Image (cartoon, rainbow, N blue to C red):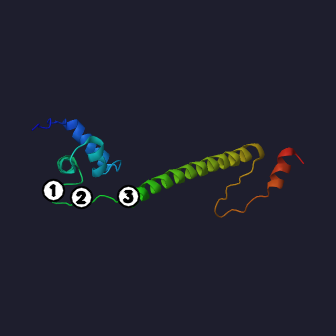
Amino acid sequence: MSLKPVRIFSEEFRKERVKEYEKGEFTVKELSRLFSIKEGVIYRWIYKYSAYNKRGIKVVEMSESSSKKVKDLQKRIRELEQIVGQKQLNIDFLEKMIEIAKEQYGLDIKKKSGTQPLSGLDQVGKKDGV
């Protein structure tokens, strides 16, 4: 009869696995398989080191479909952030064009409340001396 060697994990190692779990990088089952650690041991680490999961609070893991949904939503967030960035570039470009129009042609394109918009042709003609 041979005894299994006892593995001792550092506190840093345990905390890192809990962080990976909390970030949704791995489920308890995946951590268990990846590091050959019993799920019960990992749950004890979660209860000990987690800021969110404490004893008396049931830890509910996301199913595969929920995990996929979260990843899909994270991908959609990245796409939307990219779209927002492109829109901001467009806004910056248009604001620069408005600034140039005002400087070079004396046109105030931005509408101010209570004022009548000026005809752009009238302003260009006056500036050119026509």
Report crowding for label 2: few under 14, some 14 to 19, many 20 or more residues within 10 A (C-alpha).
few
Residue 73 horizontal/vertical position (percent)? 46, 57
Check the image and report above or below for 13 versus 112.
Answer: above
Q: Are marks 1 and 3 in contact (CB under 8 Å)?
A: no
Q: Quadrant of the N terminus?
A: top left
Residue 36 horizontal/vertical position (percent)? 25, 42
Of the two numbered discs 1 and 3 on the same chain, state the one appearing first in sequence.
Answer: 1
Amino acid on which the number 1 mark rests in the picture: Arg
With 43 as the anchor, is 128 left or right in this view? right
With 95 as the anchor, is 85 left or right in this view? left
Amino acid on which the number 2 mark rests in the picture: Val
Check the image and report above or below for 12 versus 88.
Answer: above
Residue name at image x 83 percent, y 55 percent: 122
Residue name at image x 38 percent, y 60 percent: 66
Disc 2 versus disc 1: distance between alpha carbons?
9 Å
Residue 11 horizontal/vertical position (percent)? 19, 37
Tell me the tag on residue 64. 3
Residue name at image x 29 percent, y 58 percent: 61
Residue name at image x 38 percent, y 56 percent: 67
Q: Which residue is mark 1?
A: 55
Dot 3 lies on which element? helix
Amino acid on which the number 3 mark rests in the picture: Glu
Q: Which residue is mark 2?
A: 59
With 112 as the anchor, is 106 left or right in this view? right
